[in-house]
Each structure stands twice: as C-alpha cells, then as structure tokens.
Amino acid sequence: AQSVTQPDIHITVSEGASLELRCNYSYGATPYLFWYVQSPGQGLQLLLKYFSGDTLVQGIKGFEAEFKRSQSSFNLRKPSVHWSDAAEYFCAVAISTGNQFYFGTGTSLTVIP
Amino acid sequence: NAGVMQNPRHLVRRRGQEARLRCSPMKGHSHVYWYRQLPEEGLKFMVYLQKENIIDESGMPKERFSAEFPKEGPSILRIQQVVRGDSAAYFCASSLSYRRGGNEQYFGPGTRLTVT
C-alpha cells in the first residue's frame, strides 16, 4: 500500500533562517507529488507539485521542492522563512492507478522572531 | 472566481443525530473528493464523485456514511446517527479534469464537526 511519511511532527525556526521539511513516500513507480499548506482553521492551499520533468520545482511564496527518486523523497525548502509561514505543511502523493491523494500526517512549523 | 465552498464551517451534533455537509466545487469543476482529518492526523480519502455518480468510495465507512453529487446543487456528505468518533474536519476538494493521479485538487475550508 502507498504511504507518505513526514518524519518531523513539529519544527521551530527563526525568522530569516532556512527551512527544509522532509517527505518520504512508498510506491513502486514515480508518483505525482504535492505540498500543501494549512493555516489554522483554514483549508489547504497548494504550494507546488511535481508530475514529471525537472526534479526541482518552484512554488508559490518562495518555496521549492526537489524530487529524489533514489531516496523516494520530495523535501520542501525555503531559503528564508517569514513569520507568516507558520502553519501546518502536508505532503501528498497520488498514483496513476488511483483517484485519491495520500497525505502525510503533517509538519507543524513555528517561526520565532 | 470563487473557490471551493463548504458549509457549514462548524457543525455541532448530539450523538444519534444526522450531519449533512455541503460542498460546492469551483466553477466548471465536475469532480469532487471528500477527505476526513482526525485530530493530529493527515487527511484520509473518503470518496470521489462526478455528477450523479460515485466513482470511488473505497475510503468510506461501510455504515452510516453516504455521499452524493446531484446534477444540480452541491455535493452532500451525510452521516447518520453520529458518534463521538465522527468528530473531525471534513474537507471537500474539486478538480477540473480527470487524469489518474495527475489531477490538481483544490480544497475548501472544511467543515468541523463536533459530536457531543
């Protein structure tokens, strides 16, 4: 069965510091990969997605993610975090033979001044 | 262009009552997905519908839960005889087109159901 792992439940970074959120998936072929952000009490907003091609993808709000097939990973990065980035981040995977997204359990990001 | 709309945003029900959650997809979208988010967990797929058809309900509990997406009007997720374990946030997503795995889903703000 497909699974998505976000090893870090909670991360705290200082404003202006760099950020990397980890995501690993379990699936035999190359899946479709997504990162979503959820602010408190809000729905999910798509940050970026990978379907094929260049393994480094750019998203909104200055985020980027890199697909590494050998590591089955799709880590999210941002070079300089802003206080407004504090939120819950979800990695999601979709496969070519299914309809649904599989979500990780999320990483909660706290940004300190 | 309005996004995915869900109502109500918050719903409180007593055990044994029925809960009806509504989802209006983005304009022009005819594919709707329902997910459930339990506290401290990620979203779990429940059901995928197109207009008047349930395409995939592999994530729906076998009893008390049903979903529909009529020709006219919003998609409805219905939970009969709610229990405390049904307390969760229920998210609806919609997509414009369908391509297995490759459809970009847009999410609504969710309905937070509390069962007392």
Image: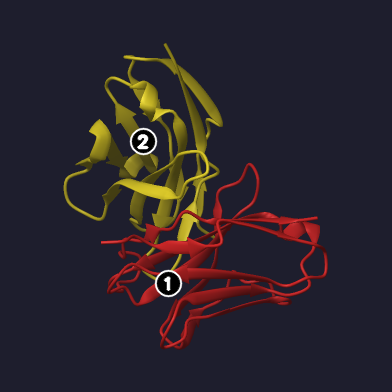
Q: Colour of chain B?
A: red
* Left or right: A94, with A107 as reference point: left
Q: How many labels were placed on the picture?
A: 2
Q: Amino acid at mark 2?
A: Asn
Q: Position of residue A50 (x, y in %)?
A: 27, 50
Residue holding disc 2: A75
- Name the chain letter of the residue that bears numbered label 2: A
Nearer the viewer's eye, disc 2 or disc 1?
1
Residue in the image at 25% along x and 55% along y: A51
Q: Amino acid at mark 1?
A: Val
Q: Position of residue B22 (x, y in %)?
A: 53, 70
Residue in the image at 38% along x and 29% along y: A85
Q: Position of residue B93 (x, y in %)?
A: 42, 63
Residue in the image at 32% along x and 45% along y: A69
Quarter where residue B88 is shown: bottom right
Q: What colour-coding does the image apply?
A: by chain
| Element under disc 2 | strand
Residue in the image at 50% along x and 24% along y: A11
Q: Quadrant of the C terminus of chain B?
A: bottom right
* Left or right: A44, with A69 as reference point: right
| Element under disc 1 | strand
Work out whether residue B76 or residue B49 is closer to the camera in this orientation and state it. B76
Q: Is residue B80 above or below residue B2?
A: below
Q: Quadrant of the N terminus of chain B?
A: bottom left
Quarter where residue A47 is shown: top left
Residue holding disc 1: B32
